Amino acid sequence: MSALPWLVALWLFAIGFYGMMTSRHYVHLIGCLSVMQSGTYVLLLAAGFRWGAGPPIFSDHPPGTPAVDPVVQALVLTDIVVGAAVTALLLALALQLHKRRGTLDPEELKPMRR
Amino acid sequence: MSSALPPLAAAGPILVAAILLALGHHLPRRSADIVAVLTALAVVGLGVLMATRTGNGALLHWFGGWSPRDGLPIGIAFQADLAGSAMVALVGLLFAASFVFAWGFFEEVGVQFHVLMLVFMAAMCGFCLTRDLFNLFVWFEVMSVAAFALTAYRLEASALEGALNFTVTNSLGSLMMLAGIGLLYARLGRLDMLALGEEAARAAGDPVIPGAFCLLAAALLIKGATVPFHLWLADAHAVAPSPVSMVFSGAMVAMGVFGLARLTWTIFAPVAEVTAALHAVILWLGAAAAVLGGMLCLGQRHVKRMLAFSTVSHTGILLMGVALLSAEGLAGTLAYLVGHGLVKGALFALAGVLMARLGGIDEIGLRGRGREIWPAGLAFAAGGLLLAGLPVGLMEEGTKLLDAAAGSEPYPWVILAVPIGAGLTGAAVLRATGRIFLGWGEVKGEEEHAPSEDEAEKANRPLPLMLAPVVAMLLLAALLPAHLAAEVAQHAATGMMQPGITPASVSGGEVPQHLPLGLLGLGLALLIAGWHLGRSRLPTLLSEGVEAVSAPVFAGLERLHSGLIGDELAWILAGLALLSLGIWFA
Amino acid sequence: MSPRARGILATLAALALAPGALAVLRAMPAFGDHPLPYGDAVNRIAPAERIVSNMVTAVNFDLRGFDTLGEEVMLLAAVVGTVVVLRGSRGEGVGDRPATCGDRPIPPRSEAVVLLCRIIAPLTLLYGLYVVLHAQLTPGGGFQGGAIIGSGLLLVWVGEGYNAWRRLVPGVVLHALEGGGAGLYALMGFGAMLTGAAFLTNVLPLGEWGSILSGGVIPVVNFGVGLAVSGAFGMLFLEFLEETREPKDGEEP
């Protein structure tokens, strides 16, 4: 049981990668990138978890009560912002490309018309 | 030694960028150009100032005053050693040159170009100075995001496709880096790189740490465009506007190599599996990149694409110095990195001159049309000769140091990849010079079948303004006193290999030399360039015989670079597998 | 490469990676039962020395506050990049042009939607502000609250339509929010340096436990982040909504 979160993270990474590699539509590909990103959330949050500990917010319970690692939670927050920022940019690029080429199939889009 | 200087390199340009963005609509014309140039020059000054102060050990700055408690680091630190400070100075210099070169070029997007470029510069400075692994990731990502948008600036289909592939592959790299950080944190519970290094030394034999190295190295090699992680680069660098390509090829790609050296010597040096894999896999990947990049470069006709492949080749050379795992090798890499950055920046600026002045970038299409701008031709030839290995300046010093480092290798001939790569790329640039500026080379070779596209840039700037930064960069790369460069590079390398420790004094003096690698490269370049340009005078039997052999090779290489995102991703996975096999068998 | 060749290459690579991945999986620490020295140190030190109860906020805005500066400029770069890619200056000051895309019809909004949005939008904005301001006490903070404020702005578009939205939320103001927020963050860092302390040192009075003004510099930089994120999300929505409008003659699409 104790390896489950690591397995989930690996699975999300692998399936996201598979989706990206075989994708036939850029918007789908961007979605797959987000799936991979979720793998990193799982990995980081799992790395900071501790059985029987509460949230690292001491407003309901006093400081000193066992709590999970707040550092990874802060890192995941950064990670989420990264994801949102890159997704927005990628979608903007895809939008502009669709206006110019009329398709978003990666197999038909080659820079410099090779 | 504690110092208040290091944060200024990253936070200063950020503050300027934020103010520019907030007041953008109310600023007089051209003020953003002036502010950006001044900021970049200030960063150069800061880099030099920090470098001169590292004599008594690296400059340390704990953000928020959170220095370690009971030996456990709980905050983020910048640690400016000589190598990091020198990188900051190089980055500032390249951006200053790019801002001067791009004077008024990006008028239609107002201050937004300057905001992105300043953020880009700040991120590179932060990347070179930080001592915290997650902070390294943050700057890595800021660097990427700024670069993605700058690539797509032209908004033509090619530019958008290049930018999309660039964004997807490099975001994948960021995710791998983050996964590597997650593995290290789960295992070792630290984020400070020096603390991680100490813990890694204690956890000998744990497979998680080499596993994390694979992911981190793959991310940095994607950024550093090493074979087989490099497929994104040619498209991104070829389609980006030339002022942006200047910093891409000059600094951003080198960041991958520098980051790998930094991680190796702060975290992974005590882990035997990792150093063995570096030696067994990355050294040969570097050599392969040097040679293959050189061949691809020679097979191009789109000048920016040609220069992009030359960057692949030269980054391979840089990587070899890191993988040699010695002070001399690292010193060679650092000297070569600075020299290459300056020369490549100048060459991309010259490509921009072609696009602005002649309205084209295709070597064959521009044949003989460059005569009216002959000063640019002189600079182009000088850049080509320096790339090939003209025995002056920084690149030559770097080559000598690399040669000395390879002398103690079991396979010292691996270093021959350096003159081969340098010679091939130099030949390509010299061939383009001869064809564009002198009208030579009527008979076309393999390059005729390479992809190309006509592309022009706005011609709103006088030629002297565009050439001034080019000349400055080339002169700096060629005329810096050799013994000084060698000594500084060796100090920087020793300091980087012993972080936190005052570097022992290094004997400056002569670097022992085994092979005249520079002259070998130069000879090869002149031979090939002469061959290509003088095809019409060669005996038919000879030229056709060679072409019968070389044409399928070039065509095959070009077919591998299909520009399809699926192929790029598959090769990245293959590269990751190579790294993991290296660790498994080493 | 043909898809087939690509598949073979990827399969071989995956097979080569498998033993390494398995070795790493087997050596990973037991989930939920391994030492967390860094996190424990933060949980011990931050409540006592910074008088804040939300440790994630303490890490984000104080202990590792410098990361957050980078994160904020990354968001800023992404938004400016999106504006550059979508060529955002067009449509500035165009309040009377309807949002159309091709011959797609614009369905009239039902009164129920308008009423609901007029009720929900201000509440959402208020709630966003609440989440921003209570960062150091309860879950939330500048990023989360900024995103809520951004979605409140989007509700204005749903309820009032494109033209009203463009009048209410000018791009210049959004850029000023973005740049101003990031600038405030950097300025707080430099301000601490003026007193001789390190960059981003918490030099303001720390306040009392549980008060909305506790934490010294934390609420200030957190507010800067809130401003920047609201501006950033507003700008993103604005840019993508601009795409529903036909370009005028001479505009770059």
Image (cartoon, rainbow, N blue to C red):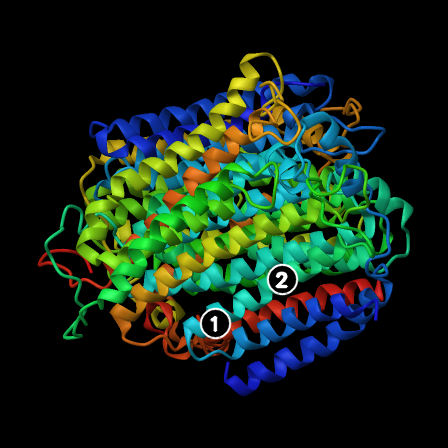
Asked whether, in this view, residue B427 is left or right of residue B335, the answer is left
Residue sticking out furthest to the top: C195
- Circle 2 SS class: helix
Residue of label 1: A29
Q: Nearer the viewer, residue B576 or B482?
A: B576
Q: Are marks 2 and 1 in contact (CB under 8 Å)?
A: no
Residue B474 appears in view? no
| Amino acid identity at mark 1 | Leu
Mark 2 residue type: Ala
Q: Position of residue C120 (x, y in %)?
A: 36, 55
Q: Position of residue A40 (x, y in %)?
A: 64, 60
- Where in the figure is residue C218, as x and y percent of width and height? 57, 30
Residue A26 lies in quadrant:
bottom left
Q: Chain of mark 2?
A: B
Query: Residue drawn 36% across and 37% down?
Result: C177
Q: Which of the labelled discs sits on residue C118, or is there none? A: none
Asked if C106 appears above or below B202 in the picture, the reply is: below
Foreground residue among B487 and B3: B3
Lateral position of residue B150 relative to residue B287, left or right: left
| Vertical side of C140 occupied by B461: above or below | above
**Which quarter of the rendered picture does the N terminus of chain B lie within?**
top right
**Secondary structure beneath label 1:** helix
CA distance separating discs 2 and 1: 30 Å
Rendered-image quadrant of the C terminus of chain B:
bottom right
The answer to which quarter of the image holds residue B50 is top right
What residue is pinned by disc 2?
B288
Question: Residue at image x 58%, y 20%?
Answer: B5
